[in-house]
Amino acid sequence: MDLPIQLLQQGIRRGSVLLSESFEDINHAKFFAVIGVYEDRIAGFFFINSRIHPILQAKPEQFAMQYQLRKKDYDFLRYDSFLGANELLTRSVSDLVNTMQIGQTSIVGQLTNEDLTTILEACRASKLFSPKEKKQFFY
C-alpha cells in the first residue's frame, strides 16, 4: 500500500531513525538519525555505525561526538552501536520521501528521549558546528 506523501513527511522528524540504501558512495543499507529539520531540509542525519572509526581517535572533537546507542533500547540494532554526530549532513525532505516511496528508505524507530536530549546538548556545545547550523538544526 502506498502511503500519502504528507504521512511519510510526518514520520521524518527530530529523533527519527531510518534505514536507507540510497547513498551513492555506500554499497549497503545504513541506519541514520534525523537530529534537525529546518524548512525543507533534514540535517544531522548522523550515521549509526557498529564501531568508531580508528582515525577519529586522533581527532578529539570528532571522537567526542560518537554517542553510544545500546541494543537493549533499540529493536533494530543487532548490537551496541555508535551514532556519529561529528559531521552535519543535510538532505531535502522531498528527496528522502521519494526514496521511501520506492522502498529504498524506511523509518525503523525513534531515538529515546534521553539519547536525543544528550545528543542535542552535545551538538549545541560542539565546536564542529557553526552558530548558524546550531540555531537551524539543534534548537
Image: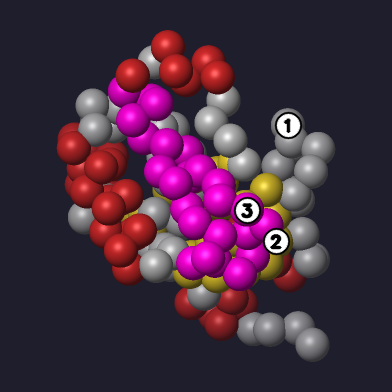
Three-letter amino acid code at the position of disc 3: Tyr
Mark 1 vs 2, N-terminal side = 1
| Left or right side of 60 for 126 | left
Q: Nearer the viewer, residue 80 or 11?
A: 80
- Picture coordinates of residue 87, whole percent (x, y): 44, 32
Mark toward the viewer: 1 or 3: 3
Three-letter amino acid code at the position of disc 2: Thr
- Picture coordinates of residue 88, whole percent (x, y): 42, 37
Q: Is residue 9 visible?
A: no
Highlighted magenta segment, given as a residue range:
61-84
Specify the quadrant that holds the C terminus: bottom left
Specify the quadrant that holds the N terminus: bottom right
Compared with residue 106, is residue 95 higher up or lower down, i.e. above or below? above
Compared with residue 95, is residue 56 higher up or lower down, i.e. above or below? above
Q: Mark 2 sits on what residue?
A: 105
Residue 52's mark?
A: none
Q: Mark 1 sits on what residue?
A: 25
